[in-house]
Image: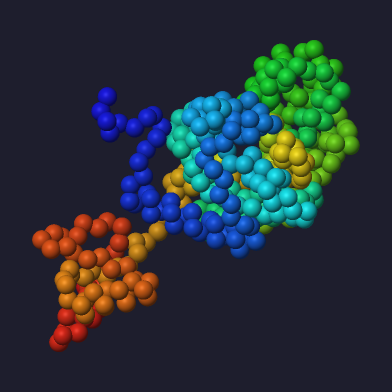
Amino acid sequence: MSAWVLPDHTADVLPSGARLIEELRRDLLDTARSYGYELVMPPLFEHLESLLTGTGESLDLQTFKLVDQLSGRMMGLRADTTPQVARIDAHLLNRQGVTRLCYCGPVLHTLPAQPHASREPLQFGSEIFGHAGLEAELEVMSLALDSLRVAQVQSVGVDMADARIVRAMLANTPIASDRLAQLHAALAAKDSASLADIARPFPAAVRQGLLALVQLYGDGKVLFEAEKVLAPSALLTTALSDLKWLAAHLEGAPVTFDLADLRGYAYYTGPRFAVYAPGAPDALVRGGRYDEVGAVFGRNRPAVGFSLDVKALVDVAASRPLKAAVRAPWSEDRELRSAISTLRANGETVVCVLPGHESEVDEFQCDRALVNHGGRWMVQPI
């Protein structure tokens, strides 16, 4: 095999793509900072038990594993940053009040999430710890929409669900963990035939409710329909009420509901959401409440957050203009060197044309040149 052939679902990012990714990364972090989120930088690899404890089988399957040559212990290359941020909140910061944290860094997946997806996403995310009220969900969802707005992604829509709905329906129904995973998969795929087979041993009301859940997707009327067709319980009433409140208070995007969507069910403990946009093969953003994520680190704090892949975001974000630049000749002339240094110190990009070569620059728009007029170096339009 040729030495320059990369593994499947990995790719070099060339100047044009790298510029867009880096500009978006900076804008996303600045947007999170405008909400009061503090930046953290967890390590790319950790002891495996720290990365995977309490995260569920799906993340385990997505995690690359290796042996640490220093300690002999099993290590994992992170497939998701959320558990690390929960560890930082619970173990290192150990604050009593609300903590807002954000991050942006690579994660590695053993398998691509989608047919053409990268196995090395650049994950940006924001987490808020310490507040159990719906205000935290609303803030995180608003930040997610503002993050897409700064990327100039058009016509986004929010889809919502709640992990408590199925839990309420199954509260008094014993079910093995492997069978529960099959049930969640059938609901997410809206596979009524498989769902009916899995639910056959259940009480009639539970079986009928699960089959009805597959049809409960659409606009706000879905929540009122759910109140009619699902067996009532205090937990179900709370979940539906919370979804209504969030939909009524969220601004900036239309809201729909898919009450059978259980992707990430091992994480989420309450409302969850996904943000879609035209041209994106899957959700650009996923997030919600996951109050149990810090329990394994000694602090079972309320937690809400979201994440997105900046590389995937570039594919649907608006194009950005090239940065204006100044073209300058190369010379040992002190006045020229001083003029170039002054321009760069003032924030200008100056591209020097090396002797005997034309400057092949694709990512800068050289619209001005540094020229000598009467012994003085001056910038003039090209």
**Quadrant of residue 288 within the rendered picture:** top right
Residue at 43% over, 33% down = 116
Residue at 83% over, 36% down = 236
x%, y% of residue 42? 57, 45
Horizontal side of residue 181 vs 348, given as left or right: right
Task: Single out the residue that lies furthest toward the bottom.
Answer: 374
Which image quadrant: the C terminus? bottom left
Residue at 54% over, 57% down = 29
Residue at 67% over, 16% down = 194
x%, y% of residue 313? 48, 47
Which image quadrant: the N terminus? top left
Task: Out of 268 and 292, give the one closest to the viewer.
Answer: 292
Snapshot colouring:
rainbow
Up-down relation of residue 185 to residue 151 (above or below): above
Task: Out of 41 and 103, give the one closest to the viewer.
Answer: 41
Up-down relation of residue 364 to residue 237 (above or below): below
x%, y% of residue 260? 70, 31
Task: Single out the residue that lies furthest toward the left.
Answer: 356
Horizontal side of residue 379 vs 311, given as left or right: left
Task: Out of 211 and 71, give the one closest to the viewer.
Answer: 71
Report whether residue 138 is seen: no
Up-down relation of residue 76 to residue 186 (above or below): below
Count the marks. 0
Report whether residue 225 is seen: yes
Up-down relation of residue 262 to residue 323 (above or below): above
